[in-house]
Image: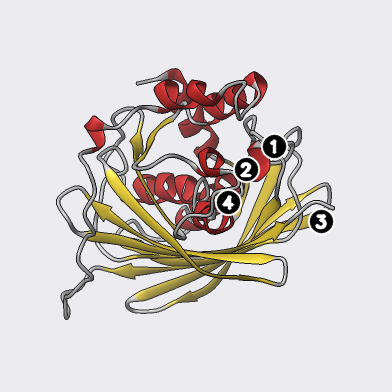
Amino acid sequence: MHQALKDLLDLLDLEQIEEDMFRGQSRSAVVPRVFGGQVAAQALVAAGRTVPADRLAHSLHAYFLVAGDPGAPIVYTVDRIRDGRSFTTRRVVAVQHGRPIFHLSASFQTYEEGLDHQAPMPPAPDPESLPTAAELLPRYADSVLSPDVVARMLEAREAVDLRYVDAPPFAFVGKPQPPRSQVWFKAGGKLADDPLLHVCLATYVSDMTLLDSVLLAHGRGGWAVGDVVGASLDHAMWFHRPFRADEWLLYDQESPSASGGRGLGQARIYTQDGHLAITVIQEGVVRVPR
């Protein structure tokens, strides 16, 4: 297992400081604030720690309230909203420096049989045929990105093997594209069999590229080139079917709308054998600097 993945798993292994209260640390990010995917994943870990093991996460809904400080711990307080016969609901508030920075509601369910259908998986190339981040990103050093930005992006993605099907948005600056993007991803090593861990790892990665499709529609490169100021506002995920985050997952993303200084991204995540595992929707601030 890559050391970066071990470090990420350590971040997700929260310290319990009181009943229903947990503390998490932060890792370096490509921007001077806590990475939103980290906060969402840690909050889901906190919620899951208060739920019976036979109840699996099936959805989460979250709001990013204030940018987190990467130099300070985050305290997660869990409210046990409901424990029903089939469903369990938890609410989590993440606090830093005495104020809430993030809210999450998550629902868990015991397994049951039911109706079953899904949207078909779109075509995509074999992930092993695509360049790794270490192979792809340095191609844009100096010409589009500064070497420092490339180094920070590579560091942030060391724990996860994430491969673009097409070029990333900063390759199309000034050249608007269809508002759609695909990436393959998986953890950079074998994970334990705990289903909550795989769901939390996917939650972590889900915040990395979802708004790329907004940028593509307008020929913008995002924070990496400084032509857009952005931040996640809210995030929702539905976990439909079992999956492993240490096996290839296709993240098929698109943007149906951008307006009012905000952009919307929606996506479906498929297993490599074609099962729809997760649906994701996120809105973020997308502002053009003045």
Q: Using the numbered discs, state the Cα–Cα distance from disc 4 to disc 2 in whole angstroms.
A: 24 Å
Say which label, 3 or 2, has the lower sequence index.
2
As rendered, which of 81 and 94 lies closer to the eye?
Answer: 94
User: Which element carries disc 4, helix, strand or loop?
Assistant: loop
Residue count near mark 4 (Cα–Cα under 10 Å), binned few <14, some 14–19, many ≥20: many
As rendered, which of 54 and 102 lies closer to the eye?
Answer: 102
Judge from the rendering whether residue 238 lies leftward or rightward of residue 193; answer left or right: right
The picture quadrant where one finds residue 267 is bottom left
Q: Position of residue 232 (x, y in %)?
A: 64, 56
Residue count near mark 1 (Cα–Cα under 10 Å), binned few <14, some 14–19, many ≥20: some
| Residue extending farthest front | 175
Q: Please name the residue that numbered disc 1 is placed on.
A: 31
Location of the N terminus (image quadrant): top left
Residue 181 shows up from this direction = yes
Q: Using the numbered discs, state the Cα–Cα distance from disc 1 to disc 2 in whole angstroms.
A: 8 Å
Q: Please name the residue that numbered disc 4 is placed on.
A: 219
Tell me if label 1 and label 2 are in contact, CB under 8 Å. Answer: yes
Q: Position of residue 181 (x, y in %)?
A: 41, 52
User: Which element carries disc 2, helix, strand or loop?
Assistant: loop
Task: Name above or below for residue 205 compared with residue 72.
Answer: below
Residue type at mark 1? Val
- Residue at 32%, 76% (x, y): give it: 86
Say which label, 3 or 1, has the lower sequence index.
1
Residue count near mark 3 (Cα–Cα under 10 Å), binned few <14, some 14–19, many ≥20: few
Task: Name above or below for residue 76 compared with residue 281.
Answer: above
Q: Please name the residue that numbered disc 3 is placed on.
A: 99
